[in-house]
Image (cartoon, rainbow, N blue to C red):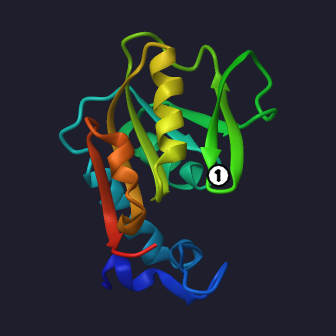
Amino acid sequence: MKKIEEYVRSIPDFPEEGIIFRDITSILQDKDGLRLAIDEMQAELKDVDFDVVIGPESRGFIFGVPIAYNTHRPFVPIRKKGKLPCETVEIEYDLEYGSAVIEMHKDAIKPGQKVVIIDDLIATGGTTEAMVKLIESLGGEVVKMVFLIELEGLNGRSRLEGYDVASIIKYEGK
């Protein structure tokens, strides 16, 4: 079987010159690549005590739901503003060019619940930092974060100091 890195398609100069886009659709489209990605991410939770899996829209859903299912835990989605039907909590955060708002149901996390965050990518860490603030505002405790890919050149970990952060594939650049 191939290593997980071999399933990632790298596309130079996308979305702009000098950037190498790390495309995970090549993982998703291969039955062995998909299984390997989920298995390796889930293995990072082997000795972690947790109650809930959280994943952001949309690629966090792809990896978070099967991990929640496999570990027999509930899955809580974090979505873009206006996509959830019940009472929500929200947070606005800065992006490279502008800002965004994410939200989750107000009753999704109970005080004291131990939460893991699953997502495909950590880049600057801004979205993850916002998710942590939402979770903690409801009394949840983030005990682990697992990412399929980390772009180390964007220093996302620096925004998440004090948290247990794991990534399966690390790329030095952006």
Q: Residue furthest left?
A: 47
Give the answer, above or below, for where 16 lies relative to 34: below
Q: Secondary structure at mark 1?
A: loop
Q: Position of residue 19 (x, y in %)?
A: 55, 81
Outermost residue toward the bottom in this view? 12
Q: Circle 1 is placed at which residue position?
A: 58
Q: Is residue 106 left or right of residue 32?
A: right
Q: Are there few (<14), some (14-19), or many (20+) residues within 10 Å of tag 1?
A: some
The amino acid sitting under disc 1 is Ser
Please state if 54 lies on the left or on the right of 116 as rendered: right
The count of marks equals 1
- Tell me where residue 151 sits by quadrant: bottom left
- Residue extending farthest to the top is 111
Looking at the picture, tell me which residue is in the foreground, 56 or 125: 125
Query: Residue 18: percent from the left, percent from the top?
Result: 55, 85
Q: Residue drawn at (26%, 51%), measured in percent from left and top?
A: 44
Q: Residue at x 33, y 48 (%)?
A: 158
Residue 121 percent across, percent down from the top left: 48, 59
Q: Determine the image quadrant of residue 144.
A: top left
Please give the name of the residue rendered at 34% of the width and 50% of the height, measured from the top-left corner.
157
Q: Residue at x 76, y 18 (%)?
A: 86
Q: Establish if 163 lies above or below 125.
A: above
